[in-house]
Amino acid sequence: KAGVTQTPRYLIKTRGQQVTLSCSPISGHRSVSWYQQTPGQGLQFLFEYFSETQRNKGNFPGRFSGRQFSNSRSEMNVSTLELGDSALYLCASSGDPRSSSFFGQGTRLTVV
Amino acid sequence: ELKVEQNPLFLSMQEGKNYTIYCNYSTTSDRLYWYRQDPGKSLESLFVLLSNGAVKQEGRLMASLDTKARLSTLHITAAVHDLSATYFCAVDMTDNDMRFGAGTRLTVKP
């Protein structure tokens, strides 16, 4: 069974640009969550999608957005990039609500 | 605002010793998770604890949950070098909205 796949793995962008990250969940999983990991703030919840609907959103500015497609694949977008957006962005998928989420390898975004 | 506090944040152990990592959280939840992260890697699920008094064991690691005290523990028995990693606890707010502790960086020395 294939795991959670995130693309790209590494990305370098310039301040002010926008970026789109992709996440393909485990087959059959309908819930996809996104997290930002930085040395200073740790792991922070961005948002969660289930069946193309955003159910929860963390405390991030509106520059951070996401969506989920009918095949459960999800994308997150960050507009007007700031240096502080440099982080590892992790996607997690979940099937059974009583089991844990499975994380992808992450996309490491560097904003210069 | 939910707070999830882990301690210690850094732990250096000798091989063969036992130790416990603590995870306190500030709001009611009946779902708590433990994850492991190796340097430069993603998070690997270790345990899911779903009810008060739940205890799970895998190899040298054992996790427990006390929902009344809002406390979970991760106990390490007879540590070995391969257990060196960062361990996170996470509390499920609702619908896969997990709030993570700061992590405990464990180093096991020979």
Image (spheres, rainbow, N blue to C red):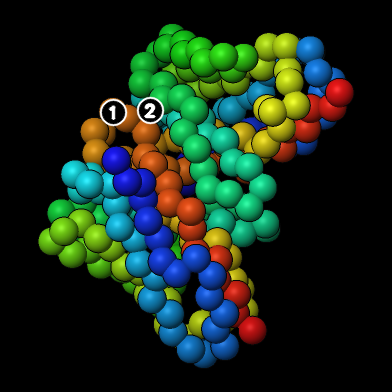
Of all chains, the one bearing label 1 is: A
Residue for point 64% across, 84% down = A112
Residue for point 52% across, 34% down = B35
Q: Position of residue A25 (x, y in %)?
A: 29, 52
SS at badge 2:
loop
Q: Is residue A74 left or right of residue B108?
A: left
Can you tell which quarter of the image residue A6 is in? bottom left
Label disc, if present, on residue A60 of the rendered structure: none
Can you tell which quarter of the image residue A67 is in? bottom left
* A106 vs A99, nearest the viewer: A106
| Marks 2/1 same chain | no
* A78 vs A63, nearest the viewer: A78
Q: Is residue B97 left or right of residue B45?
A: left
Q: Is residue A89 left or right of residue B76?
A: left
Q: Mark 2 touching mark 1, by CB under 8 A?
A: yes
The image shows residue A79, relative to residue A21, as above or below, that is: below
Q: Position of residue B71 (x, y in %)?
A: 54, 21
Of all chains, the one bearing label 2 is: B
Q: Which residue corresponds to mark 1?
A: A98
Q: Position of residue B11 (x, y in %)?
A: 78, 30
Alpha-carbon distance for marks 2 and 1?
Answer: 8 Å
Q: Is residue B62 left or right of residue B76?
A: left
Q: Which residue corresponds to mark 2?
A: B31
Residue B69 seen in the current view: no
Residue for point 53% across, 48% down = B42
SS at badge 1:
loop
Amino acid type of disc 1?
Arg
Can you tell which quarter of the image residue A75 is in? bottom left
